[in-house]
Image: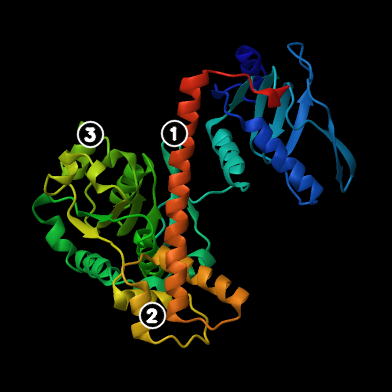
């Protein structure tokens, strides 16, 4: 199959050996994009031509799409040989054999530029991606063949997190962030890497992700904020050093914190860290600090600062609650603090929602007692759910021990 694909490629590009990719899964994606464009009558140079092939015939039903020039026959997930025109300059070939719904073989061949363009279109539906590290804004980093590209996070999503700067731990994080970039010469003297690594720890729902997003929202106009996951974290650090550009990298819950190898440790302690004299500020977070590899948590320098984010006490709980309470709520601060002391932001939000649901049924006013009752209800519901799960597990195991495996008559 692959030799057949290469022969067809050479007919168009005799002086280019091309790049051959096996099982890239491009055909279903590119055909879906084309079908969508045809249905919406969007002008596009993208086109798929079915070529005669003696190797296989189509195993899928045709799809008829209405276009401005009439109806057109398409094959959304077919076996066969296809010539795909991406634009006036780049054409690729795909040879595809679909054996059944789970097994298929696909060979894609084209020039390196054409395949890069194909990947861009399949990934985002557009032909051009941001491949250079941006100077500002909030972005996510991805990679294709170890080449980075960036997708901007929607402004509406970023804007809504500015108001969460009231979190009591936000100022601690922001002060550390500002001090690092204000004194960047200190962190790059004597050949230092210019990277600062901060770890946020705490139970789920305490606001770790929220304060990081708030920091990103407030400072996005002055610096590039990059969300990175997995190996893309290292790629983001390398790109920042390559461009010598200040950057904030957010890498929440990356597995390398729990299972560190020698290269990860060297990356964190500076021996393999890319040098960025403009500054690379990295924020990690975890719900389970005890699981972090002790070679990271107990070795000074691999994590520069740890900020613990726990449940709110009265004052912080009051400020958080005011973001979720109705505008006409008149609960006194003392009463509000008493009801919500030692709760997390996620719990405060849910307590208020439950309390509002309760008073709709009773037609009472929203009071501190209503919040206390809602808090007790949530706590009791959680305990009941946990007990039910434990009891169900015990019952099933006891039943199995007594009767052994039994036929499931519902299947007949």
Q: Quadrant of the N terminus?
A: top right
**Of callouts 3 and 1, the N-terminal one:** 3
Q: Are marks 3 and 2 in contact (CB under 8 Å)?
A: no
CA separation in Å, label 3 and label 2: 50 Å
Q: Looking at the image, which is closer to me, 266 or 207?
A: 207
Q: Secondary structure at mark 1?
A: helix
Within-10-Å neighbours for mark 1: few <14, some 14–19, many 20+: few
Q: Classify residue 73 as left or right of residue 170.
A: right
> Percent from the top left, x then y, of residue 333?
36, 85
Q: Are marks 1 and 2 in contact (CB under 8 Å)?
A: no
Q: Can the viewer see residue 323 in this picture?
A: no
**Of callouts 1 and 2, the N-terminal one:** 2
> Which marked residue is nearer to the observer: mark 3 or mark 2?
2
Q: Secondary structure at mark 2?
A: helix
**Of callouts 3 and 2, the N-terminal one:** 3
Q: Which residue is mark 1?
A: 394
Q: Which residue is mark 2?
A: 336
Q: Which residue is mark 3?
A: 263
Residue 310 lies, with reference to residue 32, above or below; the image says: below
Q: Classify residue 329 as left or right of residue 343.
A: right
CA separation in Å, label 3 and label 1: 45 Å
Res. 264 image quadrant:
top left
Q: Looking at the image, which is closer to me, 403 or 252?
A: 403
* Point 27% across, 72% down: residue: 171
Within-10-Å neighbours for mark 2: few <14, some 14–19, many 20+: many
> Percent from the top left, x then y, of residue 395?
48, 33
> Which marked residue is nearer to the observer: mark 1 or mark 2?
1
Q: Classify residue 316 as left or right of residue 407.
A: left
Q: Quadrant of the C terminus?
A: top right
Residue 27 lies, with reference to residue 242, above or below; the image says: above
């Amino acid at each position: 199959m692959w030799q057949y694909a290469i022969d067809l490629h050479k007919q168009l590009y005799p002086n280019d050996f091309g790049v051959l990719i096996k099982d890239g899964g491009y055909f279903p994606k590119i055909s879906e994009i084309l079908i969508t464009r045809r249905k919406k009558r969007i002008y596009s140079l993208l086109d798929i031509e079915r070529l005669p092939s003696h190797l296989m015939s189509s195993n899928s039903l045709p799809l008829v799409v209405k276009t401005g020039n009439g109806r057109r026959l398409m094959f959304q997930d077919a076996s066969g040989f296809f010539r795909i025109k991406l634009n006036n300059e780049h054409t690729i070939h795909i040879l595809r054999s679909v054996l059944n719904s789970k097994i298929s073989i696909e060979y894609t061949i084209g020039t390196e530029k054409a395949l890069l363009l194909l990947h861009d279109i399949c990934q985002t539906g557009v032909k051009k991606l941001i491949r250079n590290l941006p100077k500002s804004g909030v972005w996510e980093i991805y990679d294709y063949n170890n080449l980075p590209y960036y997708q901007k996070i929607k402004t509406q999503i970023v804007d809504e997190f500015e108001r969460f700067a009231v979190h009591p731990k936000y100022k601690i994080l922001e002060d550390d962030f500002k001090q690092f970039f204000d004194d960047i010469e200190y962190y790059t003297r004597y050949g230092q890497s210019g990277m600062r690594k901060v770890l946020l720890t705490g139970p789920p729902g305490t606001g770790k992700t929220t304060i990081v997003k708030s920091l990103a929202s407030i400072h996005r106009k002055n610096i590039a904020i990059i969300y990175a996951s997995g190996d893309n974290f290292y790629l983001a650090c390398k790109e920042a050093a390559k461009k010598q550009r200040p950057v904030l990298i957010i890498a929440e819950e990356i597995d390398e914190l729990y299972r560190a190898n020698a290269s990860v440790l060297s990356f964190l302690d500076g021996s393999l860290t890319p040098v960025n004299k403009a500054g690379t500020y990295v924020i990690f977070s975890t719900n389970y600090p005890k699981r972090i590899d002790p070679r990271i948590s107990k070795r000074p320098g691999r994590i520069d600062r740890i900020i613990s984010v726990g449940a709110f006490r009265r004052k912080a709980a009051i400020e958080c609650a005011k973001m979720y309470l109705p505008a006409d709520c008149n609960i006194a601060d003392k009463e509000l603090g008493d009801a919500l002391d030692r709760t997390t932001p996620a719990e405060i939000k849910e307590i208020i929602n439950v309390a509002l649901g309760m008073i709709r049924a009773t037609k009472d006013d929203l009071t501190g007692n209503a919040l206390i009752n809602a808090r007790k209800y949530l706590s009791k519901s959680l305990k009941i759910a946990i007990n039910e799960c434990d009891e169900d597990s015990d019952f099933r195991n006891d039943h199995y021990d007594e009767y052994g495996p039994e036929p499931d008559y519902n299947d007949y």
